[in-house]
Amino acid sequence: MNRRTFLGAAVASLVAAACSSAPKAVSTTAPATPSPTPGPPATKATVELVKGGSFSFTLRADKAPQTVARFAQKARAGFYDNLTFHRVEDWVVQGGDPLGNGTGGEKVPSEYNDLPFAIGALGIARGQDPAINNGSQFFVTKKDSQFLNNQYTNFGMVTSGIDVVNGIKIGDRMKTIRIE
C-alpha cells in the first residue's frame, strides 16, 4: 500500500469513526519506513574497521537522495558501529545488518538510477520485491558487476581503500562510519 493510499484510508477511517455513535476498530497495515528527515548534505563517507584500515566513498545524493540521507543519518547516529560484514564473496562484501546474518533491517522504497555497478560501487541490499530495499544493509562490489545495473540502488563509489575492501573477511566489524 503506498503512502497516499494509506493516508487516505486512515483519514477516511477517522472521519467515519468520528461520525459514528459506536466506536469502531481501525485496522491498518504499517507502511514502509518513512523517508529520513534531511540533515546536512552528505557527500563522502569513511568506513573504519575494528581490525584496522579504512575505505572512503563518495555519496551520490543526486542519484539516490533518500538512500544517501538514510545511510548518513544512520551512520551519524552510530547505527553501523560494531556491525559485521556478514557476506563476503569474490565479487562483493556486504554489511550493515543489525542481526548480523543478512535478514535484518527495515523495508524502504528502492531508488534505481543510471549509475553502473563497476568495481567499488556501493549498493543497497534488497529481497525478492524490487520495489523494496533494505533500510541498512549495503554492499561494495569488488569486481565489475554490471548485471546489477537497474536491479539495485547504487548510491556511491569507493574513492580510496579498495585494497581494504578486498581484504574484508566474514565477521569483520565496522568500528564506525564517518560522514562528511
Image (cartoon, grey):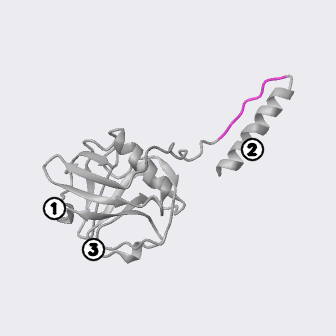
Q: Which residue is mark 2?
A: 8
Q: Which residue is mark 3?
A: 143
| SS assignment at label 1 | loop
The kind of residue tagged 3 is Lys
Number of the label disc, if any, that sits on residue 167? 1
Q: Is residue 121 left or right of residue 54?
A: right
Based on the displayed image, in which of its 4 quarters is residue 61 positioned?
bottom left
Taking the magenta stretch, the answer to whether it contains residue 23 is: yes
Question: What x and y, as percent, mark residue 22?
Answer: 83, 23
Residue 19 visible here = yes
Q: CA distance from mark 2 to mark 1?
A: 50 Å
The kind of residue tagged 2 is Gly
The kind of residue tagged 1 is Gly
Which residue occupies 51% across, 42% down? 37
Q: Which residues are magenta?
A: 22-28
Taking the magenta stretch, the answer to whether it contains residue 92 is: no
Question: What x and y, as percent, mark residue 124?
Answer: 41, 59
Q: Is residue 2 left or right of residue 40?
A: right
Residue lying furthest left: 52
Q: Is residue 7 above or below residue 1?
A: above
